[in-house]
Image (tube, grey):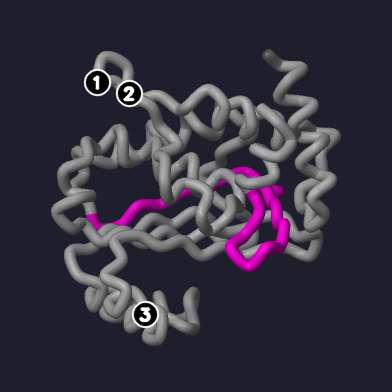
């Protein structure tokens, strides 16, 4: 993967470069799905965290849980979730923007003093498009998009996943290699200079 290709994954639509990875173990919780689906969704998260050689935990000592996935049929349901507006103070305005954009997913990241990810809120409106995606594929895709702070346009044109034999979902090799490189202990937890992409690209190349 060229440095330019790596840089594109973390260059936002306003032209700024911004990278961040988790700085603490990930403690997930999932709302709005049937109990039978929970192991599948958590399995996708565990697979991506393991690939990154990062850690999971039952609880976060500061927040209790730090990766929250909310599934809903309509964005207005979020407003009725108890205490969610305390976690996401801009919730009412956000719901209005999501409805206006006819969006079906959104992620909010929170960061610690070093700039590392300390929490992520994932909101999914199960419209006809998302409802048609198998649970394991949806879990893997959302986990990939939550494991790093990607560019806001990183996966607009191409999914982070590939299909084997048209059915089995796997993380695209270049995306997986990039995640592993990003979690190399010698790499910074946050970067705002595009030269960071050169270091990532070098580690991706060395791993292949």
> 110 or 28: nearer the eye?
110
Q: Find residue 151 and report its image quarter.
A: bottom right
Mark 3 and mark 1: Cα distance apart in space: 35 Å
Q: Are marks 1 and 2 in contact (CB under 8 Å)?
A: yes
Query: Which is nearer the N-term, disc 3 or disc 1?
Result: 3
Q: Is disc 3 placed on a helix, strand or loop? A: helix
Residue at 41% across / 52% down in the picture? 29
> Quarter of the image containing the C terminus?
top right
Q: Position of residue 178 (x, y in %)?
A: 64, 32
Q: Position of residue 119 (x, y in %)?
A: 57, 59
Residue at 76% across / 41% down in the picture? 197
Residue at 29% across / 33% down in the picture? 136
Mark 1 and mark 2: Cα distance apart in space: 5 Å
Judge left or right: residue 191 versus residue 38: right
Q: Which residues are magenta?
A: 10-32
- Give the main secondary structure, helix, strand or loop, of the magenta stretch: loop
Residue at 23% across / 49% down in the picture? 130
Label at residue 97 = 3
- Determine whether 196 is above or below 99 in the image: above
Residue density around tag 1, few if under 14, some if 14–19, many if 20 or more, within 10 Å: few
Q: Find residue 36 and report its image quarter.
A: top left
Judge left or right: residue 90 versus residue 190: left
Circle 1 residue:
166
Mark 3 and mark 2: Cα distance apart in space: 32 Å
Q: Position of residue 166 (x, y in %)?
A: 24, 20
Judge left or right: residue 170 versus residue 13: left
> 204 or 184: nearer the eye?
204
> Quarter of the image containing the N terminus?
top right
Q: Is disc 1 placed on a helix, strand or loop? A: loop
Q: Are marks 3 and 1 in contact (CB under 8 Å)?
A: no
Query: Which is nearer the N-term, disc 3 or disc 2?
Result: 3
Circle 2 residue:
163
């Amino acid at each position: 993967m060229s440095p330019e290709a790596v840089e594109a994954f973390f260059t936002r639509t306003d032209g700024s470069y911004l990278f961040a990875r988790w700085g603490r173990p990930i403690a997930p919780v999932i709302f709005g799905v049937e109990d039978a689906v929970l192991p599948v969704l958590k399995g996708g998260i565990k697979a991506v965290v393991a690939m990154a050689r990062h850690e999971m935990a039952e609880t976060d000592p500061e927040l209790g849980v730090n990766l929250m996935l909310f599934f809903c049929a309509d964005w207005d349901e979020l407003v009725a979730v108890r205490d969610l507006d305390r976690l996401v103070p801009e919730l009412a305005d956000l719901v209005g923007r999501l409805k206006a954009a006819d969006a079906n997913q959104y992620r909010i990241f929170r960061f610690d003093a070093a700039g590392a990810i300390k929490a992520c809120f994932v909101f999914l409106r199960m419209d006809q498009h998302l409802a048609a995606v198998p649970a394991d594929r949806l879990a893997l895709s959302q986990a990939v998009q939550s494991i790093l702070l990607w560019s806001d346009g990183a996966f607009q044109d191409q999914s982070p996943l590939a299909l084997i034999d048209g059915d089995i979902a796997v993380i695209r090799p270049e995306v997986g290699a990039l995640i592993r490189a990003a979690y190399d202990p010698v790499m910074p937890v946050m970067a705002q200079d595009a030269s960071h992409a050169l270091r990532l690209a070098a580690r991706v190349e060395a791993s292949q």
